[in-house]
Image: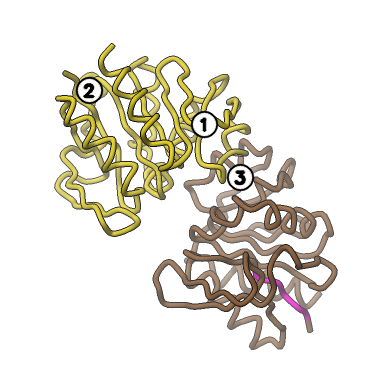
Chain colours: A yellow, B brown
């Protein structure tokens, strides 16, 4: 079973956290919520979901986790204003461990400058940012490029979760 | 006196609409609210400000306006998912008429692909996107590059408004 870090802050897309989190737990994986401050509670865009941060990102170490989930919404935009969050995402991608990115999640990877030459998808509004970052934008339900698994929006969640669970099982 | 188009949708940063709008009106300028649907009411992030859309962006023509204001918040991210909004912003920049962009507003200009070689500022989270779009990111209160006037965040509003009013008067 794997330990999955979830990097998250306020205004995340509720379903993009809640559905993968439930599926990962059901499959026996353990989740650790990494955020800006240990102990704070962050809330989804729809105000439906609250998450307590287990580990401050400044104290988080890639070697303690097997995979990273980055939910979308406006959480990635907020996270990437903080150097420690950007550095953590950068190290995770570079470690080769699986990174699950949905919707606006690639924003964090753009600021981390790890998308050059990668194939990735994401929410349509950030399409040009993904291309400008040197990546190939692929308009598909799920795109698997080595360790990065990406999807476009909540409608892609079943396919996204299936692909993520396969990576965790492999 | 000038006619200023304000391109706006839900989740705009309240002060980044409200303060320039009040200052422009006080100086005798006329505002026209351009959005996704004529007659709809859009609401700021802080739920403090409501704006009624006067003209759908699909029907808006650059020649009817003297300048464009793009408030920040998450409104630009939502607008740039719509081709008509992107095209309107592109034509406005290319017309040479003043464009006032604050906070996340450059996101719309990135998707419009009009920032290559320009000097601009914006909210820190979109810094890498601005650089990847081929622009020079300048960390200053206000940056005036030909017809584009830009600022970083609500704290820059007094300087931003002063620079915008000067452009409208010239």
Can residue B141 be seen by looking at this rendering? no
Answer with left or right where residue B162 lies relative to residue B116: left
Residue B88 position in % (x across, y down):
74, 58
Looking at the image, is mark 3 or mark 1 nearer the viewer? 1
What type of secondary structure mainly makes up the magenta span?
A: strand
**Crowd class of label 3 (few under 14; some 14 to 19; many from 20; radius 10 Å):** many
Instruction: Give A93 or B26, whichever is nearer the viewer.
Output: A93
CA gap, disc 3 to disc 1? 26 Å
Q: Is residue A60 above or below residue B8?
A: above
Is B26 rendered above or below residue A15?
below
Residue that label 3 marks: B137
**Of the two numbered discs 2 and 3 in the rendering, the one whose residue sits closer to the viewer:** 2
B43 sits to left or right of B114: left
- Rendered residue at 28%/59% (across/down): A47
Residue extent of the magenta highlight: B2-6
- In the rendered image, residue B90, in percent from the top left (x then y), is placed at 75, 53
Foreground pick, B73 / B124 = B73
Label 2 neighbour load within 10 Å: few <14, some 14-19, many 20+: some
Distance from the alpha carbon under mark 2 to that under mark 3: 35 Å
Q: Quadrant of the N terminus of chain A?
A: top left
Question: Which residue position is annotated with label 1?
Answer: A121
Numbered disc 1: secondary structure: loop
Percent across and percent down for residue B133 are 65, 39
């Amino acid at each position: 079973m794997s330990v999955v870090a979830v990097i998250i802050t306020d205004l995340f897309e509720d379903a993009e956290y809640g559905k993968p989190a439930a599926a990962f737990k059901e499959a026996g994986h353990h989740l650790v919520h990494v955020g800006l401050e240990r102990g704070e509670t962050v809330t989804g865009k729809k105000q439906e979901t609250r998450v307590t941060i287990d580990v401050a990102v400044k104290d988080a170490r890639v070697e303690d986790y097997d995979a990273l989930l980055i939910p979308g919404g406006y959480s990635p935009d907020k996270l990437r204003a903080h150097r420690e969050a950007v550095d953590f995402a950068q190290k995770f991608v570079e470690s080769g461990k699986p990174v699950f990115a949905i919707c606006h999640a690639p924003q964090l990877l753009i600021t981390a400058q790890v998308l050059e030459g990668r194939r990735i998808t994401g929410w349509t509004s950030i399409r040009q940012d993904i291309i400008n970052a040197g990546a190939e934008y692929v308009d598909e339900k799920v795109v698997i490029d080595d360790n990065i698994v990406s999807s476009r929006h909540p409608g892609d969640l079943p396919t996204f979760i299936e692909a993520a669970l396969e990576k965790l099982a492999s």
